[in-house]
C-alpha cells in the first residue's frame, strides 16, 4: 500500500514540472528570415535538413556557441558547409531581419553578428522585449567574397541564445 501512495505523491509532484518542461520545449523563438538563413532555407524546403524544417525558430543553446547549430546535434545539418545553401549577394552593408514567434519575444540582452570568430556588430537591447520582426543593418566594410555570418540573439533573463547562419557574397 505504501508504494502506491509514494507513487501517487511522486507523480503529483512531478506532473506540473513535466508540463512546464514540455510546454517550454514546444514553444518557438526566432531566426533570421532575410536574407534567408540556413534554417529559413530548411523551412522553405530549399535545402534538405531533416527536423529543422519544422522548427527553424528553435535553434537555441547556451550563450557563447560559435556554430550554426547552437551546439545541438539535432540541428547538425546547419553546420554542413557542403550543402547547397543559397548565397545572397550583398554590398558593404547588409540588413538582417529576424522573425520572432509571437508570444516568445524574450527579454533581450543584445544581438551579435560574427564572421570567422570576429564580432562585427553588437546591438544592445537592455532587457527589452523585441517585436515579432526586427532588422539590423550591419557594416561588412573591408570584406569581399563569400562569407558565413553567425547571427546571435542573446536573452537577458537566461543563459540562452538563438543562432542563425547566413551565407552571403560581399561585393565592394
Image (cartoon, grey):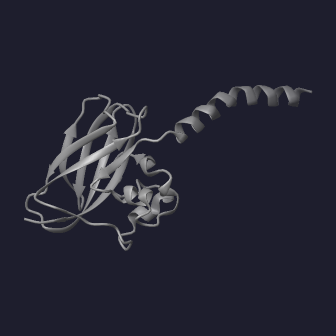
Q: Residue at x 64, y 35 (%)?
A: 18
Q: Residue at x 23, y 54 (%)?
A: 114
Front one among 155 and 139: 139
Q: Quadrant of residue 88?
A: bottom left
Front one among 169 and 2: 169
Front one among 38 and 121: 38
Position in image of residue 35 (x %, y %): 27, 55
Q: Residue at x 92, y 27 (%)?
A: 1
Does residue 66 sit above or below 103 in this rendering?
A: below
Q: Is residue 18 left or right of residue 5?
A: left
Position in image of residue 66 (x %, y %): 33, 56
Q: Residue at x 24, y 49 (%)?
A: 96
Does residue 18 sit above or below 68 in this rendering?
A: above
Position in image of residue 170 (x %, y %): 15, 64
Q: Is residue 17 left or right of residue 166?
A: right
Q: Is residue 2 left or right of residue 36?
A: right
Position in image of residue 81 (x %, y %): 35, 70
Amino acid at each position: 500500500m505504501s508504494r502506491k501512495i509514494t507513487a501517487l505523491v511522486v507523480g503529483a509532484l512531478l506532473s506540473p514540472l513535466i508540463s512546464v518542461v514540455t510546454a517550454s520545449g514546444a514553444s518557438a523563438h526566432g531566426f533570421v528570415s532575410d536574407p534567408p538563413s540556413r534554417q529559413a532555407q530548411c523551412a522553405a524546403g530549399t535545402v534538405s535538413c531533416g527536423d529543422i524544417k519544422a522548427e527553424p525558430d528553435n535553434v537555441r543553446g547556451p550563450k557563447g556557441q560559435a556554430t550554426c547549430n547552437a551546439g545541438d546535434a539535432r540541428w547538425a545539418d546547419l553546420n554542413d558547409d557542403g550543402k547547397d545553401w543559397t548565397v545572397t549577394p550583398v554590398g558593404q552593408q547588409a540588413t538582417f531581419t529576424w522573425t520572432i514567434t509571437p508570444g516568445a519575444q524574450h527579454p533581450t540582452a543584445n544581438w551579435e553578428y560574427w564572421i570567422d570568430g570576429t564580432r562585427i556588430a553588437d546591438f544592445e537591447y537592455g532587457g527589452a522585449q523585441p517585436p515579432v520582426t526586427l532588422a539590423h543593418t550591419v557594416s561588412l566594410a573591408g570584406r569581399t567574397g563569400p562569407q558565413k555570418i553567425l547571427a546571435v540573439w542573446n536573452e537577458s533573463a537566461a543563459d540562452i541564445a538563438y543562432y542563425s547562419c547566413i551565407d552571403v557574397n560581399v561585393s565592394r
